[in-house]
Amino acid sequence: MNNSRASGVLMHVTSLPGSDSIGCFGKEARDFIDFLADSGFTWWQVLPFCMADECNSPYKSYSAFGGNPYLVDLRILTAEGYLTPDELASVKQDTPYVCEFGKLNLTRMNILRLAASRATDEDRAEIAKFAAENPYLEQFCEFMARRAANGDAPWYEWTSDAIDETEHFAWQFIQFHFMKQWSDIRAYANGKGIRIMGDIPIYVAYDSCDVWANRDQFQLDKDGRPTAVAGCPPDYFAEDGQLWGNPLYDWKRMKKDDYAWWSDRMRHMLTLFDGVRIDHFRGLESYWSIPADAATAKEGHWEKGPRAPFVKQLRKVVDECEEKLGYRPLIVAEDLGESTPELVKFVHDSGFPGMRVFQFAFDGDPANTHLPHNYVANTVAYTGTHDNNTLLGFVWECDASTRRDLLDYCGFTDENWNRPESYDAIIRTLMASVADLAILPIQDVLGFGADCRMNTPGEAEGNWSFRVTADQLASIDRNRFARMNRMYGR
């Protein structure tokens, strides 16, 4: 990690303040970057930028490459003449406190289609050039247009080869402006000394252009149906395990072309971000394979992943990007969950930093790798991730004995534990650790409770909608975090 200590904040773009039902690539993104810079943070970690599924999760999408249309800022499109102020006002949010997914699902694509209909001939020529230069994004646009021509049915139920040309251009318009707006945000961040870490979901959705266009690279039968699907075994989060349902890769087939699809995916991600977290990295060492007709993930079993040859190819891509960009992109291995000696060795040999989460540390085992005194430098340490409770919620819900142990560990011995100082002690413990990078979810920076968590794994409803307001961000003591970052050399 370039032998430098740093810190950052985890907050998805959708959680930003704004006026249009969801956070996006508008002024508020720049305001958040200003907050990070003023507070001494140097990393902004986001969640996947791809389209979300029917449960609003960005970890199961129509495309591993395509950008989420909801992140395109309508105010910028209005300023550029594609929408009128009255049209913009017609989709103004009802509340600033949550992502209004119901409203977005009914209105956002229609107003983006309206904007696309006003593209000039010059716009169309520029967008056609963009499509030609970005074949995976163009593949996504074609997929969505074919899907529309088939009544929005999944690709494995299509009855026609038709393509809706109006819809095709609308998706090209959206992807063009998505990339244009995000490029401006990233340039602003880099100019302020802020690097941005993206997130690569390890798997893709069955109903995706990735599977549709690359069927031979997945474990499918002759009719295109999955023979086995992804998930994880029973663990801390779910006693039956998690049945994700994503088709599994045919790693033997992928190896034959040096993992070309994955290499292109990583190259694309490193045009968007200064680093990426590879979700469920342990699935590259061994993955949980569940029969496609299984009722729960308990019926699965472990299979060997692509292991060292795959990592070697990823490192080649990173080397290419380093030569082109002039700095080495950061690759983070999300190695949480059930661990094995083989996984520990795999992550170590990859050279990528693994993850440590404070909330996993207090099981009574002094050798627990999530305890800060067991960290190694090549580590990214978190109070919690998007799948965890908030720090406040976690401490509140701990049993009294565990809570006392963790607060004693952090040097807070006062019996009156429910005070800002106790949570500050936990954050300081993380920041003082040897971990090269410390990441705080925005909820923990703000001191928010369990009602503000981003996601509860295994629960289909009530997730991903958390947002902050401009007033809440303005209330943060930037000097406090700037002092902490200076004190601990971050």
Image: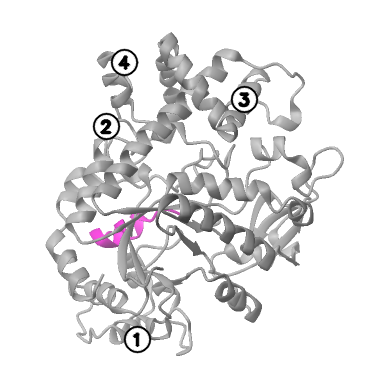
Q: Earlier in the sequence, mark 2 or mark 3?
A: 2
Secondary structure category for the residue under label 2: loop
- Residue depicted at x 37% and y 70%: 397
Query: Where's the C terminus, which quadrant?
Result: bottom left
The residue indicated by pointer 1 is 405
Pointer 2: residues within 10 angstroms few (<14), some, or many (20+)? Answer: some
Question: Which residue has dot 3 on it?
Answer: 142
Judging depth in this view, the residue of 154 and 209 nearest the camera is: 209
> Going from the N terminus, do you reach mark 1 or mark 3 first?
3
**Mark 4, secondary structure of its residue:** helix
Left or right: where 369 falls relative to 2: right
Image x and y of residue 57, in percent: 51, 45
Asked where in the image residue 110 lies, by quadrant, the reply is top left
- The answer to which of marks 3 and 4 sits earlier in the sequence is 4
Label 4, on which residue?
Answer: 87
Instruction: From the image, state whether disc 3 or disc 4 is nearer to you.
Output: 3
Residue numbers of the magenta segment: 441-456
CA–CA distance in space, label 1 to label 3: 56 Å
- At 32% from the left edge and 37% from the top edge, which residue is drawn? 184
Q: Can you tell which of label 1 and label 3 is closer to the viewer? A: 3
